[in-house]
Image (tube, rainbow, N blue to C red):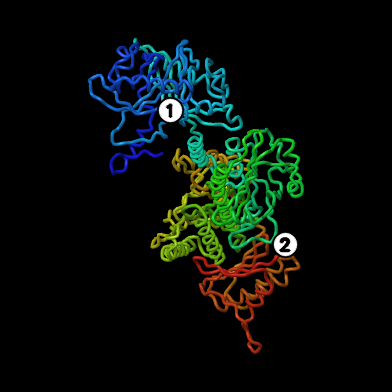
Amino acid sequence: MNPVRNGSDPPAPADACHLFDASSDAAAVLSGRGIVLGWTRGAEDLFGYPAAEAVGRSAARLAAMPEDPVRIVGIAERCRAGMGWSGLIPVRHRDGHRMEVDLRVSAVFRMHGEECFLISAHERRQRWSVGESVLDGFLTRSPVGMAVVDRQLRYVWLNDTLERLGGVPREQRLGHRLSELLPGLQTETLEGLMRKVVETGAPVTDYEYVGWSWSDPHRQHAYSTSFFPLVDADESVTGVCYMVMDVTERWNARQLLSMVNEAGTSIGRTLDVMRTAQELADFAVPRLADFVVVDLLEPVLSTAGHGTWLTDAGPASARPVMRRAGMSSVREGCPEAVARIGDRVDFLPPPRDPGMLVRGEPTLVPVLDPADDLWIAQQPEWVGSITEFGLHSLISVPMRARNTVLGLTTFVRSVNPVSFQPDDILVAQELVARAALCVDNARRYTREHVAAVTLQRSLLPHTLSGGTALEVASHYLPADPAGGVGGDWFDVIPLSGARVGLVVGDVVGHGITAAAGMGRLRTAVQTLADMEMAPDDLLAHLDDLVLRLSEEETGDGAADDGASAFLGATCLYAVYDPVTRRCTMARAGHPPPVLVTPDGRVDFPTPPAGPPLGLGGIGFETGEIELPPDSVFGLYTDGLVEAADRDMEVGMARLGEALARPGTDLDTLCRTTVQRFASGPQSDDIALLLARTHAVRPDHVASWDVPADPAAVADVRSRAARQVEAWGFGDLAMTTELIVSELVTNAIRYAAPPIRLRLLRDARLTCEVADGSSTAPRLRHARSTDEGGRGLFLVAQLVHRWGARYTPDGKIIWAEQEIP
């Protein structure tokens, strides 16, 4: 029955709580003759009498009404019958004022051989009226278990609730200690707390603990206990009164919240699908289950990562194909498992409905029966494990994130004797949901990361060749050691006349945007280099391109969707001529190259410094040096020589020392140098391009000055044919004559002196005709009626490739033939 108020206003919640709060009640122990044997501080506060004035005296003086022997006898008989009594009586405070209290009298018990009663009371609030059915039998039928123990901690009284909570009959408890009756509880700790109350007289409230009891031996319970001292006339403690409540639901809710919070820091610590699945399994064992398996769909584990088996768009027609991604067990080695990590699995709990994955419905099997026909028919491999290891309860939860099915997680109990309950499904779903989001993030990251790395690898050169002019080696190391994506690039570009172009660059930033920008610049450099541009002109065109790309990225809203604008880059471009052994180079905000001569001398030749690409409006200049044969010429990005613990000059000095190792294989030298500089964490990408120089032998070059007279064509044509035959290329003599004839004739007819013919024997046979004109040659398609215009067309058909390049004094028309 609910309490009602004497007035028309509804009761205040705080007052209602106080009405049933027994922790502040006055409590006392009376003998059968009505003499006070025990007096608590609550009694002192309520009646005003200290223990010294109350203990040993009759309790009748507290009453504010004439003594009613008949009523007293009736109450005593009721309590001796084990039912207790409660009621409303008037009492008088020590200062004389009258008040009404709700009095409760316990069933009789014995202490030191004397018949005793435990009474408790609190002041009656006049505005409340409580029905008798609420207070009747409070001590015996209260939801709070209560007991009294003596100084030796032996039970002298307990109520029905405590008897029910512990599962030990009252007769077996009385005269015994807690540790002798309930070994499954934290008896040593509880008795230690009671001794502390006996010794100090200070109460202990709301101590929570977990344990097993005889009333429910297959399930762990949580309890909250409070201990209060009973004091006598001389303020010494004669015993302890304690109250206990079953708070299992509150405890489980708190544990669930704690588990979920802990899961957030333990699951998904890496962007790796397999690691995340294993972290889920490891976390759930043994917190929730004794054996956990995580099975993911094959497309989720695929490095391509394109799609999954099922989505909310509709179910697939075939049964899902999954692989074991993670598992954990309280038994070492997971002997219960019928599949190992990486194996294909086909587990769905009976009735094996694939639609459960689409719907996201968990499956609870409270009791696993190995004799069940469904298990025998559909999962026969599990039947043996169920029998052998005592698997007795199961929960399967589909793993879904962002409307995408990822897999299935199964929780099994065997060592824990308690079967899964419906509340456990909520815990399992919460853990799986957190892991599913991490798995999906890892899957998406892996897919995008693989795409970005694939893009960068496709943009970087797969093989480098310097022809006969250079022996080259390269090494690239992104800032992310796991294969991250950056904007550093390098290239080796074959040019005409046995020359080789070397380029290294660094795009601002990291990630796929930087990689895409790097690919654009590398393509542009190759195109401009094929146009035989000088290094300074090439960088000027590249600067215009970067400026235009930055304007496009900023203007089309790319920055609004999270992609950074293409802000700029640095670059160094060098051209090495093995005939003259001269290297011409220009740089745009890039570190200078390093040169190690055959005698071990290290130098950093410094071409004129230009601004980084993308600033615009500032020109570039070239510098030229001579490279001795067998020198090591290195181009690098600033990530190699710059670091937080050193400046660039120190890094460059260390680089020179690392490269000054004579007799070292170039590939080994390149790799070990990068490894030496990248021994610790790095904040920037590293690219290193090394080239060992070679020179063309003088006897592999022949040149002649040509007079500006058509009659001279026959003479230089004959000389060229004899030289080609002397080199052992007689098969090319006729085509060489034709090429020389056409190119020299065009130079005499359309260009200006001086005119010079050069034959170069290298990987190919090259014929070059230089003149003093800057007019570009033009390939014509002559008509059948035209008398001329077929010269360059014929040359183009006979050679491997041909072209023109400009010099400070004019231009050079060149044509290359493949050597048989």
- The quarter of the picture where residue 785 lies is bottom right
Is residue 260 among the parts visible in the rendering? yes
Q: Is residue 140 left or right of residue 100?
A: right
Depth order, front residue of 561/652: 561
- Which part of the image, by quadrant, shows the C terminus? bottom right
Element on which disc 1 rests = strand
Residue 367, horizontal then vertical, whole percent? 67, 41
The answer to whether 88 is drawn above or below residue 533 in the figure is: above
As drawn, the label of residue 727 is 2
Depth order, front residue of 287/476: 287
Depth order, front residue of 580/382: 382
10 Å neighbourhood of mark 2: few (<14), some, or many (≥20)?
few
- The quarter of the picture where residue 100 lies is top left
In three-dimensional space, the C-alpha distance between marks 2 and 1, rounded to whole angstroms, equals: 104 Å
What type is the residue that disc 2 sits on? Answer: Trp
- Which part of the image, by quadrant, shows the N terminus? top left
Residue at x 47%, y 30% (from the top left corner): 141
Residues marked 2 and 1 touching at CB (< 8 Å): no
Residue 783, horizontal then vertical, whole percent? 63, 87
What type is the residue that disc 1 sits on? Answer: Asp
Depth order, front residue of 538/6: 6
The answer to whether 551 is drawn above or below residue 578 in the figure is: below
Residue 806, horizontal then vertical, whole percent? 52, 67
Is residue 692 among the parts visible in the rendering? no
Residue 763, horizontal then vertical, whole percent? 68, 60
10 Å neighbourhood of mark 1: few (<14), some, or many (≥20)?
few
Element on which disc 2 rests = loop
Q: Which residue lies furthest to the bottom in this view?
A: 785
Q: In this view, does 682 lie to the left or right of 87?
A: right
As drawn, the label of residue 140 is none
As drawn, the label of residue 206 is 1
